[in-house]
Image (cartoon, grey):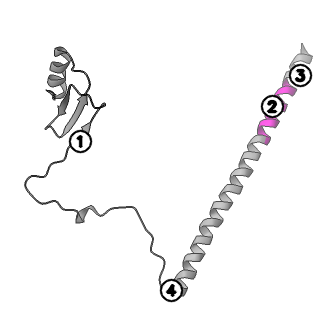
Amino acid sequence: MMLKKILKIEELEEKFDKHIESIKHKFAELKCHQEYYYNQKFNRIIENFESAKKYGSFPVLLTAALDYSKLTATGSNITSSFVIRCGTNNAGYYTIGAGNVKYYMNKKPNWLVRNCAKIFFDFTWKDT
């Protein structure tokens, strides 16, 4: 009985040692990756300073942000629409809200579904 407990304790110690070694290895890998990324970023900063020294200004950083304040639309008949189609053979479509969104369907829903969609969601069915 005592021998079995000692063997189990030794097995657990071996498992813990393997787990600790695995964790140490993962931390070492992480350290290598972090050093690599740090060196890349640091080299980029040094290159920017060398460029500024050579050309008199830092390089322009390009961003993907749009300035929406400069977008304008004029006119009285500006509307947008969004259409969803399921194939080419459509029985009709639901209009959602003011009619700017249209969801085309291959099969016409039954009376109950159409009325519930109208009452609960304000979806209006139109035959094509």
Separation of marks 4 and 2 at Cα, in angstroms:
60 Å
Q: Amino acid at mark 2?
A: Lys
Under circle 3, the secondary element is: helix
**For residue 126, side relative to residue 32 (left or right):** left
First in sequence, mark 4 or 1: give its number: 4
Label 3 crowd (10 A; few <14 / some 14-19 / many >=20): few
Separation of marks 2 and 1 at Cα, in angstroms:
59 Å
Q: Which mark is residue 82?
A: 1
Splitting the image into 4 quarters, where does residue 2 fall?
top right
* Residue at the outermost right position: 3
Which residues are the magenta region? 9-21
Q: Foreground mark, 3 or 2?
A: 2
Q: Amino acid at mark 4?
A: Tyr
First in sequence, mark 3 or 1: give its number: 3
Label 2 crowd (10 A; few <14 / some 14-19 / many >=20): few
Residue placed under numbered mark 4 in the picture: 55
Q: Which mark is residue 7?
A: 3
Question: Where is residue 125 shown, x and y percent of the image?
Answer: 15, 26
Separation of marks 3 and 4 at Cα, in angstroms:
72 Å
Separation of marks 3 and 2 at Cα, in angstroms:
12 Å
Asked whether the beta carbons under mark 3 and mark 1 sit within 8 Å of each other, the answer is: no
- 90 or 97, which is in the foreground? 90
Residue placed under numbered mark 2 in the picture: 15
First in sequence, mark 3 or 2: give its number: 3
Q: Amino acid at mark 1?
A: Phe
Q: Is residue 21 above or below residue 126?
A: below
Query: What's the residue at 22%, 62% (across, down)?
Result: 71
Q: Foreground mark, 2 or 1?
A: 1
Asked whether the beta carbons under mark 3 and mark 4 sit within 8 Å of each other, the answer is: no
Query: What's the residue at 67%, 61% (across, down)?
Result: 36
Residue 16 belongs to the span the image colors magenta: yes
